[in-house]
Image (cartoon, grey):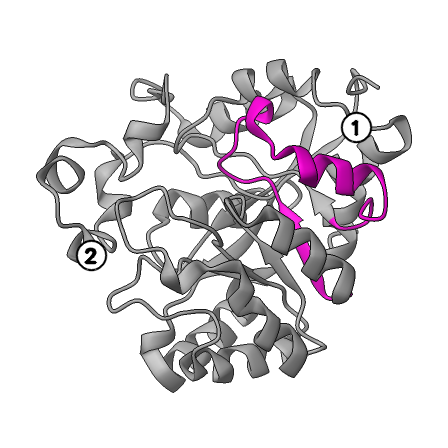
């Protein structure tokens, strides 16, 4: 069944363009070893993406983003704050009806990181904490006990944890993001909602098996063009996982909204799954309604 033309959408990964691309990735740079990644790419996984959006001449980047959202019926979008998001923070403050906040955590920060999560929750009403376990310096696997104080606080605040899982796009070792590592976390923290980012490839079979096993595990499609959505994840969404899989984009980091929604029409989701995938699952898990 094709995507409904007027289907409402929540986008779980977006950023306000403007201010240059490279500064947003400076935190990854200590882990990058090759010259191309360190000094030539606009973004660390540039080799994987064609036609990265170039939005460099708009007078008002927030207004431009809202126009793009309206074109594709995106009702709300999640923006990172507190790490590298000046315009993101402005957008969340000005348009709380359209944007909601998340924070990219670093488990190396100890209790100060826990306190920062609390501060941002009070200031921005953040709806999630995200993470890139293979990209922080030093890397921290998702089952490392450095994460446990953060997990405990997220349970207390009832906030989802959204880690990148699977082989990272940037040229970094993948061990901290092996999907099997979530098994321990989900077992020990049954109240912690975990929503994986960035595909879980090549271990998508482990991802959907763990989603069957644990009611607190979910999956978002961030950083994937729809024609590359893993087939077993789409099959899972069409069957026992219709409440587990949700849409996330990658604008402007690597994908245009125009490309995403052009390709979305060919995703073979069942009619009754579309609204869950595009809107209802995210609204429920991130408490947006």
Left or right: 94 as drawn, with respect to 19 = right
First along the sequence among labels 2 and 1: 2
* SS at circle 2: helix
In the displayed structure, 211 sits above or below 139; it is: above
Residue ID for mark 1: 269
Q: Residue at x 24, y 55 (%)?
A: 27
Q: Quadrant of residue 152?
A: bottom right
Question: How many badges with numbers are in the image?
Answer: 2
- The residue carrying pointer 2 sits among few (fewer than 14), some (14 to 19) or many (20 or more) residues within 10 Å by Cα, namely some
Disc on res. 31: 2
In this rendering, is residue 247 above or below 71? below
Residue at 58% from the left image edge and 22% from the top image edge: 227
Q: Quadrant of the N terminus?
A: top right
Circle 1 sits in a helix, a strand or a loop, which is it? loop
Say which of 215 and 289 sits in front: 215
Whether residue 164 appears in magenta in the rendering, the answer is no
Give the side of residue 210 with respect to residue 88, left or right.
right
Say which residue appears at 55% left-offset and 71% top-offset.
122
Q: In this rendering, does residue 202 appear at all?
A: yes
- In the rendered image, residue 288, in percent from the top left (x then y), is placed at 73, 52
Q: Residue at x 41, y 48 (%)?
A: 167
Q: Which residues are magenta?
A: 215-244
Q: Is residue 281 above or below residue 122?
A: above
Along the horizontal axis of the image, is 126 left or right of 76?
Answer: left
Q: Residues within 10 Å of mark 1 (few under 14, many from 20)?
A: many
């Amino acid at each position: 069944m094709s995507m409904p033309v007027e289907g409402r959408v929540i986008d779980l990964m977006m950023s306000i363009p403007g201010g240059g691309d490279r500064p947003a990735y400076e935190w990854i740079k200590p882990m990058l070893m090759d010259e191309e990644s360190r000094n030539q790419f606009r973004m660390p996984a540039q080799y994987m993406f064609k036609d990265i959006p170039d939005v460099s001449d708009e007078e008002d980047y927030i207004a431009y983003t809202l126009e793009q959202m309206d074109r594709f019926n995106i009702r709300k979008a999640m923006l990172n704050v507190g790490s590298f998001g000046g315009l993101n923070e402005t957008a969340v403050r000005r348009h709380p009806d359209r944007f909601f906040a998340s924070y990219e955590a670093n488990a190396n920060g100890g209790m100060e990181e826990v306190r920062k999560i609390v501060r941002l929750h009070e200031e921005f009403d953040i709806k999630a904490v995200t993470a890139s376990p293979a990209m922080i310096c030093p890397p921290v696997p998702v089952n490392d006990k450095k994460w446990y104080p953060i997990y405990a606080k997220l349970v207390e605040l009832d906030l989802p944890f959204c880690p990148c899982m699977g082989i990272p796009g940037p040229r970094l070792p993948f061990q901290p993001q092996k999907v099997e590592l979530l098994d321990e976390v989900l077992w020990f923290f049954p109240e912690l909602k975990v929503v994986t980012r960035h595909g879980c490839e090549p271990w998508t079979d482990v991802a959907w098996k763990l989603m069957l096993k644990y009611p607190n595990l979910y999956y978002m499609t961030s950083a994937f063009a729809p024609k590359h959505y893993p087939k077993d994840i789409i099959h899972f969404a069409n069957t026992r996982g219709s409440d587990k899989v949700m849409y996330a984009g990658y604008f402007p980091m690597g994908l245009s909204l125009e490309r995403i929604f052009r390709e979305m029409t060919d995703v073979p989701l069942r009619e009754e799954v579309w609204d869950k995938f595009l809107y209802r699952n995210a609204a429920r898990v991130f408490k947006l309604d």
